[in-house]
Amino acid sequence: MSIRDAIQAGVAAATTPEMLALRFRHQGMFTRSQNGRTREYPCRFSVRDPVKGSRDQVAAAEAFATAAGAAFRDVRVLTVHPDDARPPEGAVLADPWDGGRLEVRSWSQPSDFTGQAIALCLLRR
């Protein structure tokens, strides 16, 4: 078994309906207003503080915070269930998150292995 086969087998094991329900245990409605029209983006998702992520995620979050003129502590990483549509940049979670307003600011490229992308968000308090 090649390394690629092992990774793909691991991804397959992590994307069973049961595992996806554990990974994406939050549900919510993101909204985005443009030209006087508001669109809704319901989805299942997970949100993490990048401090708990890999070195690459921490570095990306620090660069993003600097570019956005925000405090690093207010950056969050959003992942959306693979069966749900991703909210676009500028969308805001309708319900408060961790005492603030969660706003999608930037999406990464999708992973070659999982097809999933992550979003860097700002938590505005």
Image: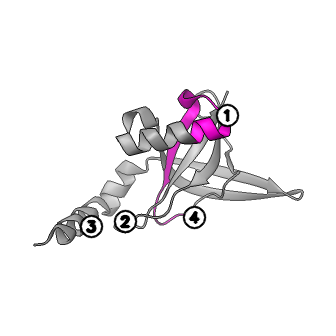
The residue beneath circle 2 is 114
Instruction: Specify few, some or many for label 3: CA neighbours under 10 Å numbering under 14, 14-19, or 20 or more.
Output: few
Identity of the residue drawn at 38% across and 34% down: 52
Position of residue 37 relative to residue 115, above or below, is above
Mark 4 or 2: the one toward you: 2
Residues 63 and 111: in front is 63
Residue 53 falls inside the magenta stretch: no
The residue beneath circle 4 is 85
Instruction: Using the image, tell me which numbered label, if any, was put on residue 69.
Output: 1
Left or right: 68, with 78 as reference point: right
Identity of the residue drawn at 59% across and 36% down: 65
Mark 1 or 3: the one toward you: 1
Instruction: Specify few, some or many for label 2: CA neighbours under 10 Å numbering under 14, 14-19, or 20 or more.
Output: some
The residue beneath circle 3 is 12
Upstream in sequence: badge 3 or badge 2? 3
- Cα distance in 3D space between marks 4 and 2: 15 Å
Mark 1 or 2: the one toward you: 1
- Cα distance in 3D space between marks 1 and 3: 38 Å
Q: Which residue range is magenta in the image?
A: 64-84
**Amino acid beneath label 4:** Ala
Upstream in sequence: badge 3 or badge 4? 3
Upstream in sequence: badge 4 or badge 2? 4
Instruction: Specify few, some or many for label 1: CA neighbours under 10 Å numbering under 14, 14-19, or 20 or more.
Output: few
Residues 27 and 79: in front is 79
Residue 74: % across, % down: 58, 31
